[in-house]
Image (tube, helix red, strand yellow):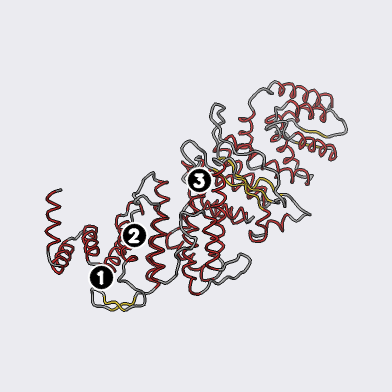
């Protein structure tokens, strides 16, 4: 330490010209770009007037190195030093001005444009956004001098704004403010209104507004998704689902086509159960602000094109967490077809060995939900069966984190669409899937007399959480009586509920009804007898045998049902 301090003091005693030439000479001797950069940063600290030449040259060299380096952001030392040190020095330099002639070290002339400074911002935004995500995903921490990546990015943004005369000081856009306040701040600066489309920001602040929206979008979308997917050790992840859709005057199809800006007040978000009340409210706020920013960035051709370019350049559309947000946003906007496309794209990227993890099962449960909502009964049942095959058998000793089973009362005016969070644990996913299939099967089984098998499969599922669906079963009985026939040879394979067995035995004994519940083999034997009494006797024996199974656990039977009957569903 003493020797180093002595060398430092001796260096300071040298004339300025000697200090400059010494640092340039030392930097030139290093083939390692990182060591060379450290020396040149010292040079720029002592000689800040060299920023237009030495600093810009260094930026180019590091940027070129990054392009040929395949390391992840968190492990890339070149990207780290470029963003956290070099760009900070350039943006804060009092010797760099836009629209001013510069002679580079190579002797070539250059005029620094606003677009060059925007490249600095984009480089930093890509770095801090990816870095923040990778810290969580890979469990690595990265020193950010006590600040979050978003705070560093905002600081850089203000420095660039000063050079570009954007006049952003004292505007309510800083990362220490709540997301909603910052969104309102952006609205004031830009004059944006979701009702005025297409939108054009005032010329002097159009570029600034674009970057404010981009940064606020990625920050709030990340905060929402990180709490959804990784809420903390021992806690399950969450999936946004649409629990129910109230039909009004038969306009369900029209409702599904409405966009957020038409019916925002008619969609109720219930994030209760996702941590404390304050945490739930913050999740809602981040989600809604991220959606507002997304819409802002789609509000005109220029913004939409630039935002798409950035996302493609960063590979953002392949980030699983961002796909989670895009899927949830599509569900919120009732664009269930787009949500399914996003969810299935992500699901097919998941390795077979990892598909049982909760953060991936959420893709399937949301797919089930969306398929059911836009009427794809076959798809809903197919994906529900696939999901159930991945679920572990429920363990009653496990601490179960549950989300609200019932929704709070309607606000005024009443919400016609209600979204809530489903905890991605077997104890919640299984009942949800069964509930969704019951709803989809009902529409087919009760409306189409030719779909007898759907009616039988509905009976099997109504056993779950009995007598919760007792009223639905009463409708099944009424339907059978009206049609005067019912054929479901798989009945005794899957039905063990005593109440359902008694009701079906009663129907089987009604001579006016044609009820077939026995498998084909036993029915053939009955036909050869040619006696109704013999058929009834076989039914009675089968029922007595089935009653002895009433105390068996239902879940394994239902799992067999989904595994064996998947194609029929």
Residue at x 70%, y 32% (from the top left corner):
463
Instruction: State whether residue 72 is above or below residue 499.
Output: below
> Nearer the viewer's eye, disc 2 or disc 1?
1
Look at the picture and state if 501 lies above or below 438. Answer: above
The crowding category of the residue bearing disc 2, from other C-alpha atoms within 10 Å (few below 14, some 14 to 19, many at least 20), is: many
Q: Percent position (x, y) of residue 279?
A: 53, 44
Give whichever of discs 2 and 1 has the lower sequence position. 1
Query: In the rendering, at what x and y percent does residue 389 appear?
Result: 56, 38
Q: Secondary structure at mark 3?
A: helix
Quadrant of the frame with the C terminus: top right
Neighbor class of circle 1 (other Cα within 10 Å; few <14, some 14-19, many 20+) is some
Number of marks present in the image shown? 3
Whole-angstrom CA distance, mark 3 to mark 2, is 27 Å
Using the numbered discs, state the Cα–Cα distance from disc 2 to disc 1 in whole angstroms: 20 Å
Q: SS class of the residue under badge 2? A: helix
Q: Pointer 3: what residue?
A: 227
Judging depth in this view, the residue of 159 and 505 nearest the camera is: 159
Q: Which mark is residue 294?
A: none
Q: Where's residue 260, x and y in %? A: 63, 58
Q: Residue furthest right?
A: 512
For this view, does 26 lie left or right of residue 184? left
| Residue designated by label 1 | 49
Q: Residues within 10 Å of mark 3 (few under 14, many from 20)?
A: some
Q: Quadrant of residue 424?
A: top right
Q: Toward the viewer: 549 or 201? A: 201
Q: Earlier in the sequence, mark 3 or mark 2?
A: 2
First in sequence: mark 3 vs mark 1: 1
Q: Secondary structure at mark 1?
A: helix
Q: Which residue is mark 2?
A: 83
Q: CA distance from mark 3 to mark 1?
A: 45 Å
Residue at 36 percent of width and 54 percent of height: 73
Frontmost of labels 3 and 1 is 1
């Amino acid at each position: 330490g003493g020797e180093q301090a002595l060398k430092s003091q001796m260096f300071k005693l040298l004339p300025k010209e000697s200090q400059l030439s010494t640092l340039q000479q030392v930097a030139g001797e290093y083939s390692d770009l990182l060591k060379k950069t450290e020396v040149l940063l010292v040079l720029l600290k002592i000689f800040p007037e060299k920023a237009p030449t030495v600093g810009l040259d260094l930026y180019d060299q590091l940027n070129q190195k990054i392009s040929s380096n395949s390391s992840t952001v968190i492990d890339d030392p070149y990207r780290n030093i470029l963003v956290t040190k070099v760009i900070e020095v350039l943006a804060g330099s009092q010797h760099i001005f836009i629209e001013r002639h510069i002679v580079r070290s190579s002797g070539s002339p250059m005029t620094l444009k606003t677009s060059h400074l925007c490249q600095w911002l984009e480089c930093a935004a890509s770095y801090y956004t990816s870095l923040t995500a990778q810290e969580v995903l890979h469990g690595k921490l990265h020193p950010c001098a006590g600040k979050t990546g978003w705070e560093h990015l905002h600081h850089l943004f203000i420095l660039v704004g000063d050079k570009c005369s954007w006049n952003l000081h004292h505007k309510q856009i800083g990362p220490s403010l709540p997301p909603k306040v910052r969104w309102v701040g952006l609205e004031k600066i830009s004059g944006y209104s979701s009702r005025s489309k297409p939108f054009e920001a005032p010329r002097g602040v159009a570029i600034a507004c674009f970057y404010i929206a981009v940064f606020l979008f990625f920050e709030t979308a990340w905060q929402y998704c990180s709490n959804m997917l990784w809420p903390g050790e021992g806690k399950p992840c969450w999936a946004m689902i649409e629990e129910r859709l109230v039909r009004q005057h038969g306009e369900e199809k029209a409702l599904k086509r409405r966009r957020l800006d038409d019916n925002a007040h008619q969609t109720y978000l219930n994030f209760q159960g996702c941590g404390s009340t304050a945490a739930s409210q913050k999740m809602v706020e981040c989600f809604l602000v991220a959606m507002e920013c997304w819409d802002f960035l789609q509000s005109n051709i220029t913004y939409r094109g630039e935002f798409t370019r950035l996302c493609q350049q960063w590979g953002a559309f392949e980030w699983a967490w961002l796909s989670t947000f895009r899927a949830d946003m599509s569900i919120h906007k009732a664009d269930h077809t787009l949500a399914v496309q996003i969810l299935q794209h992500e699901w097919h990227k998941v390795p077979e060995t990892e598909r049982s993890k909760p953060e991936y099962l959420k893709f399937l449960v949301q797919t089930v939900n969306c398929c059911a909502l836009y009427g794809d009964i076959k798809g809903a049942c197919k994906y529900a069966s696939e999901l159930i095959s991945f679920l572990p058998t429920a363990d009653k000793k496990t601490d179960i984190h549950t989300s609200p089973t019932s929704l709070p009362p309607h606000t005024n005016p009443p919400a016609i669409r209600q979204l809530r969070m489903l905890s991605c644990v077997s104890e919640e996913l299984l009942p949800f899937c069964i509930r969704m299939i019951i709803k989809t099967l009902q529409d087919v089984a009760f409306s189409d007399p030719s779909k007898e098998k759907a009616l039988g499969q509905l009976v099997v599922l109504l056993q779950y959480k009995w007598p919760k669906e007792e009223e639905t079963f009463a409708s099944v009985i009424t339907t059978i009586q009206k049609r005067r026939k019912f054929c479901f040879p798989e009945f005794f394979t899957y039905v063990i509920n005593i109440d359902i067995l008694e009701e079906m035995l009663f129907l089987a004994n009604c001579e006016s009804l044609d009820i077939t519940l026995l498998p084909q083999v036993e029915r053939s034997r009955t036909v050869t007898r040619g006696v109704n009494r013999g058929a009834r006797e076989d039914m009675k024996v089968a029922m007595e045998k089935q009653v002895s199974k009433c105390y068996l656990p239902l879940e394994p039977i239902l799992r067999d049902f989904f595994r064996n009957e998947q194609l029929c569903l």
